[in-house]
Each structure stands twice: as structure tokens, then as C-alpha cells.
Amino acid sequence: MTETPVIRIRDLHKQFGSKVVLNGVDLDVKAGESMVIIGGSGTGKSVLLKCILGILVPERGSIEIDGENIIGMNRQDRKEILKKFGMLFQGAALFDSLPVWENVTFGLLAQKKVKRSEAKSVAIETLRRVGLEADVAGLNPSELSGGMQKRVGLARAIANKPEIIFFDEPTTGLDPIMADVINDLIVECVKEVGATALSITHDMASVRKIADRVAMLYKGKIIWSGPCDEIDQSDNEFVDQFINGRAEGPIHMELLKA
Amino acid sequence: MLLGLPVNRAFEHMNFLGIIGRVTLQFLAAAGRLGLFTAHAIIGIFSPPFYFRDLGKQMLAIGYYSLPVVGLTALFTGAALALNIYVGGSRFNAESVLPTIVVIGMVRELGPVLAGLIVAGRVSAAMAAELGTMRVTEQIDALVTLSTDPFKYLVTPRIVATTIMMPFLVIVADTIGVFGGFVIATDKLGFNPGIYVEKTVEFLEKIDVIASLTKAAVFGFILSLMGCYHGYNSKGGAQGVGVATTNAVVSACILILLSDYFITEMFFSS
Ligand SMILES: Nc1ncnc2c1ncn2[C@@H]1O[C@H](COP(=O)(O)OP(=O)(O)O)[C@@H](O)[C@H]1O
Ligand SMILES: [Mg+2]
């Protein structure tokens, strides 16, 4: 049986000026699975997510969400599609002019799914799911530590029960213990809302914890993808070098040549 | 030798033309981007959703909190204007024109321009820095993922709020400026208060007030547009936000002075 993947990307190209960032990306993410994209800094992982969200417009290729190509789609339809998504940004990207509770329920309020008078209690409920106490709700994002900001960002991403959740380097900048806590929360929340997850990271501990499948982005292409438990036997020297974090290897040599 | 010039001179020549071409293209591209941004902002005023809560917040931040600086500036400018006209006018025994010139100078020109420049320093800078920070910390991208059009949510309320509030600020500036002149004239220069007020009212025409308010609204639109445009399009971290803020204030000030001339000509040049 072949079911349509939730996200199906074919031959995606994106460049900034003369700088080619994505050079023919192909990727399938199936319903309910947790896909993790790995790759070095600046390889275009965030750009890929932003293309899927329509924040950036690719030059070429197709992106299908539940079988619908979203490239060139009109604003209204795209807005409908976007309601399926939740995203945790790299720096959490909380709105610092708003208190935590308004951050968490921002999407719900925008879609008029909750009334303003009820929003705070909904926020507190969602915050509890990411392990934060009710008194955090009234604080400003600037009063929170990095780990707490990530949790609030996670709460905001899951608040409207999205079908697809993106995580952009969820553990970068956190200490190893907090990173592990966030990884657990991600696994838990994704299961709880039954979502499809697409994460990007260069933290291998995080990969092993949250991934069902892994894809490696290198030089604008997906050079390897497979189940997470096969990553150690990938027979791909780029993947091997990356997951073992070695300075020596094909990736380094390519850099020298460039 | 190339075209009769030494080779290096010839290249210098071509390089110069190249620079002109590149600068022209960049200018046209920037003008086009600004034009699109402006059109987008204006469309946003008329199409839902409307963010009245944010509009109210902005109106308070821009209008109410600019009152002290605008008021102080106007007060001292009015006072200094009165003093200058008195000294200048007394050479021709024409001190009696003082109230007329103060009121016309303040209302037609100094009130709106000074308020515009002061508010540009305060508000354009704040808008550019705030939106610029939101851009580089991905908060603007986050809005997209939360079913919100960042343009309508961030840019439109700011521009509408500033365009509405500037006329009120300018009425205050005009009034306080005239009052500053009045205080100096009656307190230091021996004018009779009753006659001063009479002359002020007598010579102030409706068109002066209309011009003043028109300038105020136009300046408000310009300075908020510049703040939002530079902030919204800023890139490259903290330094980029700094550049955006500087560009916002400088371009707002230049455009205010430029449009001031054209509005003045439109109203009073016949
Ligand atoms: N809006 C943009 N304008 C120009 N270049 C960009 C933009 N966004 C990203 N880039 C460039 O694309 C490359 C990939 O960026 P990114 O996707 O953020 O990398 P990462 O894989 O670390 O997430 C970087 O070299 C970056 O400079
Ligand atoms: Mg990134």
C-alpha cells in the first residue's frame, strides 16, 4: 500500500543571489513519523523549513502537503494549509512585547479558536504540558532562561494541536541536561497530539532520541536518508564523519577545495 | 592602449560608468521595493483583519508619550522666535508684527516640522529597532506560522496610529509654540496681553491650520513608513538593526523636509 506522504518535496532549488543553498532537495515525510534532518551549520536546513512554510519562495521544485502543491498557491489556501503547522524556532522567537500566556495562545487567538477571556487558562493548561508552572504565564519572555523560553516556544507550537510540527535546532544553546529534557518533551508532545514531526539539528544525542528516520543535507541535496537505527551502518562516508564528529573526512576535504 | 587612452585609464573610465549604472539600478530597485511596501501598507488599512488593540497601544505610545518632548520643543522655539522677531523687527520699527509672525511661523512651518523631526527621532527609530529585532530573531517568521499576516499585524497599525496622532501632536505644538511667544512678548518685551491675543487670532486663517494639519498627517505617514520599512527589511543581526535604525531616522528627516517644501508650495505659492 502506498499512502501519500504528508510532506513530499521534489527537486527543490533555492538560492540567494549567486549563492546556491538548496540544489535539488527530495524528501518524503510520512504521516505520524518523526523525521530529522541533519547537516552542518549553514547548509540550508532552516532555509528548507522556511520554504515549506512559504516564508521563502524557492526558484524551482515542488512541495506537496497532503498531496497539494503549495508553491504558487494563493494566499487564502496557503493560510488554510499553514493552520496545520506548528513550529519551534531556533531562538524560540517569542514575542517579547507580549506576556507568556499571550505568546502561547497567539495562534489560537488569531484563529479565534479561544476567547480572550479564556486564553489565559488555556495557556496555563498548555504550559503545564511542557512542565511549566502557572505563574510563568504572567511573565515576560525576557524574564525566562533559555531552557524555559524553549519550553514556552514548544507550548506555543503545540497549542493549536498542529498536524505537522517543525523543530529548528531545539537543543542548540542548552546544557546537556536541559537538552535532554527538551528532547523528552518533544517526543512526548508529538505523540500526545499525534503529529508528524520534522526536526533539524546537528546534535546527535537529540537525533537518536527523537528520530524515526534521518536525512542528511549536504551541499544543497539530501545525500542519505534512512531509519534512525541504520544510521551507524549507512555506508556513507559523509554521514559517518558527521555522526562521529570527526574533523578528518570528505566534508573537511571538500571545504578545503572550495 | 585602448580607445586612445592608456589601458589603466580606460578601465578607470569604464569602472566609473559601471558604478553609475550599478548605483542607478540599486536606486531603482530600492524605489520599487519602497513603492510595493507602501502599496501593501495602504491596502492593509482597508482589508481585514484589523488589529484595534494594537492600534490603540501604538496610538498611546506615539501620541501620548511624545507630548512632553514635542511640547518642550515647541515652547522654547516659540519663545526664541518671538525674541528673534522682536530684535529683527525693531530695526524697522516693526515690532508690532511679532504676534502675527509668531503664529504664522509656528502654525504653518515650525510646529509641524519640529514635531515631525522630533517624532521621527523618537518613533521612527523605535519602530525600526523593534521590527528589526523581530526580523532578526525570527519573530516575524513566527507570526506567519501562527496564522497572522505580519504586515497587517505590525506595519499597518503603526502607520495608521502615527498618521492619526501626528495632527493632534501638531495642534499641541502649535498652541504651545504660540504660547511660548506670548509669554516672552508680554513678560519681557512689554506687549499688552490683550492686544497680543487679538492680533494672533485676527491674522491666523483657516488655511494656515489646514496646512499645518495636512503637513502633520503627511509627516506622520512618512516617518512611520520609514521606521517600518527599514525595520521590516533589516537583516544581519544587531549591526543590521543599528543600520536600519539610522537609515530610518535619516531618511524620515530628509523626506519630511522635502515634502514640507512641496506642501507649502501647494498651499501658499499662488
Ligand atoms: N534571507 C536570507 N538572505 C540571504 N541569505 C540567506 C538568507 N537566509 C539564509 N541565508 C543563507 O543560506 C545559508 C543557509 O542558512 P540556514 O538555512 O540558516 O543554515 P542552517 O543549516 O544552519 O539552518 C546560509 O549561508 C545563509 O547565509
Ligand atoms: Mg538554522
Image: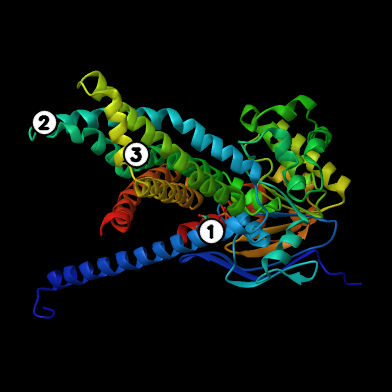
The residue singled out by tag 2 in the image is B90
Residue B61: image tag:
none
Both on one chain, marks 3 and 2?
yes
The residue singled out by tag 3 in the image is B111
Q: Label 3 neighbourhood size at 10 Å, few (<14), some (14-19), many (20+)?
A: many
Q: Is residue A245 left or right of residue B203?
A: right
| Colour mapping | rainbow
Is the shortest distance between ligand 1 and the CB of mark 2 under 8 Å? no
Amino acid carrying mark 2 in the image: Ser
Q: Position of residue B178 (x, y in %)?
A: 32, 32
Q: Label 2 neighbourhood size at 10 Å, few (<14), some (14-19), many (20+)?
A: some
Q: Label 1 neighbourhood size at 10 Å, few (<14), some (14-19), many (20+)?
A: some
| Label 2 secondary element | helix
| Label 1 secondary element | helix
Q: Position of residue B15 (x, y in %)?
A: 22, 68
Residue name at image x 53 percent, y 54 percent: A252
Tag 1 near tag 2, CB within 8 Å: no
Return the chain for callout 1.
Answer: B
Return the chain for callout 3.
Answer: B
Amino acid carrying mark 1 in the image: Ile
Per the model, the C-alpha gap separating discs 3 and 1 is: 26 Å
Comparing B172 with A165, the one in front is B172
Compare marks 1 and 2 and give the one earlier in the sequence.
1
Compare marks 3 and 1 and give the one earlier in the sequence.
1
Discs 1/2, front: 2
Per the model, the C-alpha gap separating discs 1 and 2 is: 50 Å
The residue singled out by tag 1 in the image is B42
Q: Is residue B258 above or below residue A177?
A: below
Residue name at image x 35 percent, y 68 percent: B25
Discs 3/2, front: 2
